[in-house]
Image (tube, grey):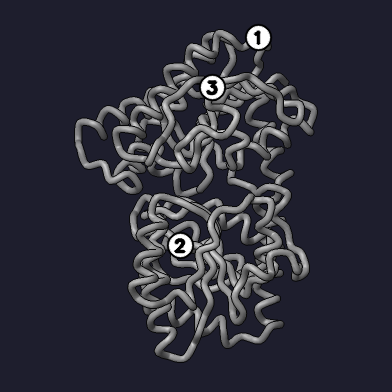
Amino acid sequence: MKILIISQYFWPENFRINDIALGLKDKGHEVVVLSGIPNYPEGNFFEGYQSGPKDEYWKGIKIYRSRLISRGHGGGVRLFLNYFSFAFFASLKIFKIKEDIDSILVFEPSPITVGIPAMVAKYRFKAPYSFWVQDLWPASLTAAGGVKNKIVIKIFDKLTKIIYKYAEKVLIQSQRFRDYILLQNVPDEKIVYVPNTTEDFYFSIKRSSKFLDLLPSGFKIIFAGNIGEAQSLDTFIDATKILITKGYPISWIIIGDGRYKSVLEKRVNLLGLENYIHFLGRYPASDMANFFSHADALYVTLRKDYIFSLTIPSKVQSYLACEKPILASLDGEGAKIIKESNSGFVSPAEDVNELVKNVIDLYELSNDERLALGRNGLEYFNREFNRNVVLDKLEKVLSV
């Protein structure tokens, strides 16, 4: 098949769709990508892209770059311009794609507007598109973006329904997305569960000396990923204060960046927790296995919100693949997976006291008991989220 992937984000930005594209190519398909000028997460165009879009090749995949307005500091107006500028210019760029296309895959970690060029591509190439839902719209506007304007929400709800209507299939990364999408007039037979996998650089390795000098001593819990308000990282800061009074000097390591990072750093300094909470900044995802090898547990958290309870945070798959115990502050589907896999401890979202209890329980386990939790997680990952399992599902959907 000749597959067009439409994603506002792509290499050198770090998104799962990069590995999916490579996987489809390795299965013998010709893969072409339509994406924007890379600027996520810092909001500025990456080095080498400041002069505008340039089409290029990456590991044998042709990438067509569309113009867009960069995210900047991520304010509401700037994000609106970022989303719609990509939708507009990518729709025009469709007509510059020279390849014949058999099937289209749309990757949507937000925004929903990525579906606009997909509708154009559907008629340009006379090819169906499958829409892989990573974030539920318009609910994500209020849950993560704080948008309350009823007119704006209504507009995006209408747009979402139109995009789903013209899709051949609507793919969902979490089973609990189904009920929400059914309410958007999508027939059940059109909805297909295709969970996220993780890149092949997330794997279990023995403790490596690499990056050891960057890490504190003692019992280490690592969080890796975007640092935003949706992650509710204040929860573990509150838990840290209590743990110290109880005599448990846990070291928390935060790897990543995001709009809320500076707020958290100021709070940590104000509370005098610098010796217990360590912000390492952003590192390539390919370095995570080495960092994780030093962890006693890996932390995943989301804010308490109905919409967040429906999703599976993508780091859950990465953590499971790395064979480490998972400590979670989650509701809903993400929590269910960690419980089903018996891979760690789960507390309700934003429940500080329950998180404290779970940290202590995890700390008190023997090394062998923690290793067993990690093995359980890896077994579950191989059964449910293995890369080949997901690629086979995608290939089947796209070949229809």
Residue 86 percent across, percent down from the top left:
45, 23
Residue 164 shown left or right of residue 342 in the figure: left
Q: Residue at x 64, y 37 (%)?
A: 18
Residue 144 picture location, percent across and down = 35, 47
Q: Choose the circle earlier in sequence order: 2 or 1.
A: 1
How many neighbours does mark 3 have within 10 angstroms: few (below 14), some (14-19), or many (20 or more)?
few
Residue at (37%, 50%) from the top-left corner? 307
Vertical position of residue 203 compared to residue 184: above or below: below
- Residue 71 at what x, y percent from top left? 41, 35
Res 156 quadrant in image? top left
Residue 301 numbered mark, or none:
2
Callout 3 secondary element: loop
Assess whether mark 1 and mark 3 are in contact (beta carbons under 8 angstroms): no
Question: What's under tag 2, amino acid-wise?
Answer: Thr
Could you say where residue 228 lies in the image, as x and y percent from the top left? 40, 53
Of all residues, the one furthest to the left in this rendering is: 150
